[in-house]
Image (cartoon, rainbow, N blue to C red):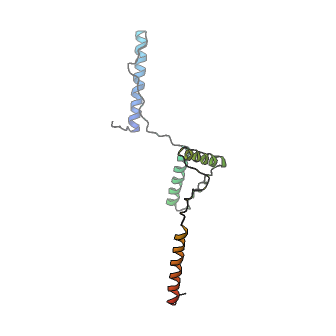
Amino acid sequence: MTRITATPAQLHKAADIQEKILSLQAELGQLLGAEVSITAEPTEAPTGKRKFSAAARAKMRAAQKARWAKIKGTASIVPAPKKKRKMSAQGLANIRAGVAKRMAAQGKALAGKPVKKARKKISAAGLANIRAAQKARWAKAKAAGKA
């Protein structure tokens, strides 16, 4: 659907024509002794105005002031930095409780710390082999003159 924009002059002319139509209908109703109903309600032409929030208007105002300051060569107004939002202790507790609940539903434990994997246990014979190999490496290094 194509939207046609009308100039202000066209809108004024349309409003004048609509007023004439309404006055002629009222006059016709007086002549006939009864009210004449309008078959179709006149629709208002779109004004093209948008509604902006107060924050958006403030941003636009600050930007316009900065543009004018740049043109005039005066110092621009620097907007104050936004304050960082902080989460309340209760909000953080709610989030942690929700996470714990979801983890429990999945069958995972959450005790505040990540779960560590169990270390592999080496047999006594395997440990003895590692120690013997280590002693051999050190003996070879000492023989080569390395500290």
Taking depth in this image into account, of 133 and 29 the one nearest to the observer is 133
- In which quadrant is the N terminus drawn? top left
Residue at 54%, 64% (x, y): give it: 121
Residue that sits furthest to the left in the current view: 2
Residue at 39%, 27% (x, y): give it: 17
Residue that sits furthest to the top in the current view: 33
User: Horizontally, is 90 left or right of 27 in the view?
Assistant: right
Residue at 54%, 73% (x, y): give it: 128
Where's residue 110, x and y in %? 59, 51
- In which quadrant is the C terminus drawn? bottom right
Where's residue 66, x and y in %? 52, 57
Residue that sits furthest to the right in the current view: 89
Taking depth in this image into account, of 50 and 75 the one nearest to the observer is 50
Where's residue 111, x and y in %? 62, 52
Residue 28 occupies quadrant: top left
Taking depth in this image into account, of 115 and 93 the one nearest to the observer is 115
User: Horizontally, is 37 left or right of 84 in the view?
Assistant: left
Where's residue 5, x and y in %? 37, 38
Residue 80 occupies quadrant: bottom right
Q: Is residue 122 above or below residue 100?
A: below
Taking depth in this image into account, of 68 and 90 the one nearest to the observer is 90
The mark tally for this picture is 0
Q: Is residue 121 above or below residue 1?
A: below
Q: Is residue 21 above or below residue 127?
A: above
